[in-house]
Image: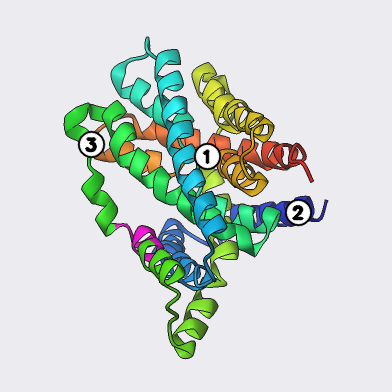
């Protein structure tokens, strides 16, 4: 129940962001600035700071399982979604497939997994996000434009992935950054959760009642928020470590990835549809995420 209340507190931050835009306290330029703060400074700082923890063979093995399971579950979700939307017009089909396939596991997943499972669970989410980015720029890009669209080289310029590489190096080697650097990283990283949730909530201003009339978009939300996470629960019947399954479950239960809208623009697909899907699934996640967390075993 404590974890559930912490997650509900995050959604209150989202409502603050929505209210700030609704009452004209913040415009699109201000939101872009906050988004830049999170993506290029706060989130990488949080990752680099939190990953400076002691490694042991058991934890390393669990992280390897998280990476493998993430690739498998995202891949399976992509194939299933593509088959379901095969009859859609190509530019629309590619967006619907990617919306259903990948979750907002970084921007929204980090705050939620820490609230639900504790600070120690962040490293599992970090590995999930690393696999997520790999799948987005390979399989996800393939659904947008075929083999020629696959662009794994884009991973080299992602600030969060650079921070993940640095953090995992520190984690695996046992090296530690000087104290004053870690103090700065800790202070900068501490703003990640409130600002990220504030920005996510502010983006909900684009929602319209007409979005609820798109049956295929509602199907995407059902798959993304309920069906695919529910399938992860079956892994509790296996010998896998509980924390591995819990972390993959929480990250999978997040709404549609904001990256989908950016990729839709890069590959000249239906960006408006992608934006609607992200906004609608995020709004619905305010109800589904707390309910899905209730399904987690103690």
Above or below — where is 187 with respect to 295? Answer: below
Q: Main secondary structure of the magenta part?
A: helix
- Relative to residue 279, is residue 178 drawn left or right? left
Q: Residue 265: name its quadrant.
A: top left
Q: Nearer the viewer, residue 194 or 78?
A: 78
Distance from Cα at disc 1 to Cα at disc 3: 26 Å
Q: Which residue is depicted at the point 52% across and 20% down?
A: 214
Q: Quadrant of residue 274?
A: top left
* Residue located at (30% from left, 41% from top): 137
| Stretch of the chain drawn in magenta | 158-164
Residue placed under numbered mark 2 in the picture = 3
Q: Position of residue 183 (x, y in %)?
A: 52, 85
Q: Which type of secondary structure does the marked residue at label 3 adopt? A: loop
Element type where label 1 sits in the image: helix
Q: Which residue is mark 3?
A: 150
**Residue 213 in view of the camera:** yes
**Classed neighbour count for the residue bearing mark 2: other residues with Cα under 10 Å, few (<14), some (14–19), many (≥20):** some
Numbered badge on residue 279:
1
State yes or no: residue 162 in magenta: yes
Labels 1 and 3 touching (C-beta < 8 A): no
Q: CA distance from mark 3 to mark 2?
A: 38 Å
């Amino acid at each position: 129940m404590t974890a559930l209340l912490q997650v509900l507190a995050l959604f209150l931050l989202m409502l603050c962001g929505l209210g700030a835009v609704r009452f004209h306290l913040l415009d699109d330029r201000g939101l872009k600035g906050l988004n830049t703060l999170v993506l290029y400074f706060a989130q990488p700082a949080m990752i680099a700071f939190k990953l400076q923890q002691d490694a042991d063979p058991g934890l390393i093995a669990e992280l390897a399982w998280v990476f493998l399971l993430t690739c498998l579950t995202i891949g399976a979700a992509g194939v299933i979604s593509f088959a379901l939307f095969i009859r859609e017009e190509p530019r629309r089909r590619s967006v619907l497939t990617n919306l259903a396939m990948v979750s907002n596991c970084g921007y929204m997943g980090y705050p939620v997994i820490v609230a639900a499972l504790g600070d120690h669970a962040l490293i599992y989410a970090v590995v999930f996000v690393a696999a997520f980015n790999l799948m987005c720029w390979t399989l996800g890009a393939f659904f947008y434009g075929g083999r020629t669209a696959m662009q794994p080289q884009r991973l080299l310029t992602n600030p969060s992935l650079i921070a993940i590489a640095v953090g995992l190096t520190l984690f695996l080697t046992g090296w530690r950054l000087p104290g004053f650097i870690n103090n700065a990283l800790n202070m900068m990283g501490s703003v990640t959760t409130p600002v990220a949730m504030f920005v996510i909530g502010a983006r909900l201003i684009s929602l319209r009642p007409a979005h609820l009339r798109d049956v295929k978009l509602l199907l995407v939300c059902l798959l993304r928020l309920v069906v695919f996470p529910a399938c992860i629960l079956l892994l509790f019947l296996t010998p896998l470590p509980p924390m591995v399954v819990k972390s993959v479950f929480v990250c999978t239960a997040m709404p549609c990835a904001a990256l989908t809208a950016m990729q839709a623009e890069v590959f000249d697909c239906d960006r408006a549809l992608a934006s609607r899907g992200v906004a609608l699934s995020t709004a619905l996640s305010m109800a589904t995420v707390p309910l899905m967390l209730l399904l987690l075993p103690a």
